[in-house]
Amino acid sequence: MKIYEYLKILRSYKRILPKQTIRTLKGQALSGDLTGAIKGLTRVMNEKGGQNEIHYINRQRPKR
């Protein structure tokens, strides 16, 4: 997997994962540790408990 493919996948988790986690994983990938970044994303998603229990952390507020 190339770095740009991984970043595209990481963007799809933008509203699910905390911003700091996304920044950490992106920084890992851009510094050259792509395998570690993939492993980290897998670990974070496994800790979330599956797709059914994911809460949208970074969702935007409705307009007032």
Image (cartoon, rainbow, N blue to C red):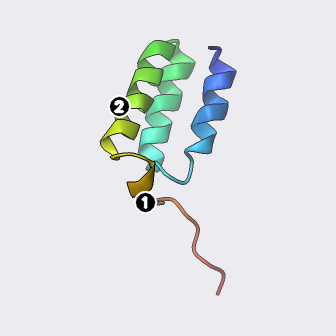
Image point (62%, 78%), residue name: 62
> Is residue 28 placed above or below 1 in the rendered structure?
below
> Is residue 21 placed above or below 3 in the rendered structure?
below
Choose between 9 and 25: the one closer to the eye. Answer: 9
Residue placed furthest toward the bottom: 64
Under mark 2, the amino acid is Arg
Choose between 43 and 22: the one closer to the eye. Answer: 43
Q: Is residue 50 visible?
A: yes
Image point (40%, 22%), residue name: 39
User: Which quadrant of the rendered structure holds the C terminus?
Assistant: bottom right
Q: Which mark is residue 55?
A: 1
Q: CA distance from mark 2 to mark 1?
A: 16 Å
Give the secondary structure at mark 2.
helix
Crowding at dot 1, Cα within 10 Å, few <14 / some 14-19 / many 20+, comes out as few
Question: Where in the figure is residue 4, as x and y percent of width and height?
Answer: 68, 23
Answer left or right for 13 relative to 21: right
Badge 2 vs badge 1, beta-carbon distance below 8 Å: no
Answer left or right for 60 relative to 25: right
User: Which quadrant of the rendered structure holds the N terminus?
Assistant: top right
> To which residue does mark 2 refer?
43
Under mark 1, the amino acid is His
Question: Hey, which quadrant is residue 10 in on the image?
Answer: top right
Image point (57%, 74%), residue name: 61
